[in-house]
Amino acid sequence: MPFVDAETAAAYREAWEAWSKQIEHVHRVFLAGEAIKPDQIKGLLNREARAKEKYDAARLALLGLDQSPLGETAGDGGNPFR
């Protein structure tokens, strides 16, 4: 019997796959020496960071910890500029 509903599980899997894809690209560039233009590195790192934030939020929802003590959604961190 699953611990979570199908929607939460699907959101988690989607976020995991998206982050995995981005972190694999970071690894190819920084660890395997894949050529990338210097001006593309910032975009690469920003995409990875955003994918990681979405994964973290989906992971917390999967674990039932998706609300912070202040009542804000864990994924936004209370940032008013998002």
Image (cartoon, helix red, strand yellow):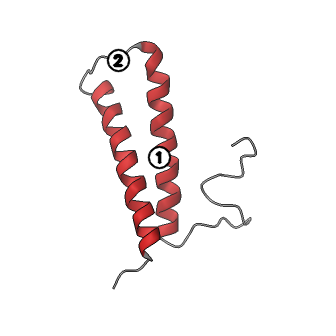
Residue positioned 44% across, 29% down in the render: 44
* Residue 12 horizontal side relative to residue 53, left or right: left
Give the numbered dot on residue 36: 2
* Residue 21 horizontal side relative to residue 74, left or right: left
The type of residue carrying mark 1 is: Lys
Marks 1 and 2 in Cβ contact (< 8 Å): no
Q: Position of residue 22 (x, y in %)?
A: 38, 39
Q: Secondary structure at mark 1?
A: helix
Q: What residue sits right under mark 1 in the picture?
A: 52
Q: Judge by depth and name the residue closer to the eye, 79 or 82.
A: 82
* Callout 2 crowding tier (Cα within 10 Å): few <14, some 14–19, many ≥20: few
- Residue at the far left: name it: 32
Q: Judge by depth and name the residue closer to the eye, 31 or 23.
A: 23
Residue positioned 38% across, 54% down in the render: 16
Q: Position of residue 54 (x, y in %)?
A: 51, 51
* Callout 1 crowding tier (Cα within 10 Å): few <14, some 14–19, many ≥20: some
The type of residue carrying mark 2 is: Ile
Quadrant occupied by the C terminus: top right
Quadrant occupied by the N terminus: bottom left
Residue positioned 64% across, 52% down in the render: 76
Give above or below for 11 relative to 77.
below
Give the numbered dot on residue 78: none
* Residue 72 horizontal side relative to residue 32, left or right: right
CA gap between label 1 and label 2 equals 21 Å
Q: Position of residue 60 (x, y in %)?
A: 51, 64
Give above or below for 51 relative to 58.
above
Q: Position of residue 69 (x, y in %)?
A: 70, 67
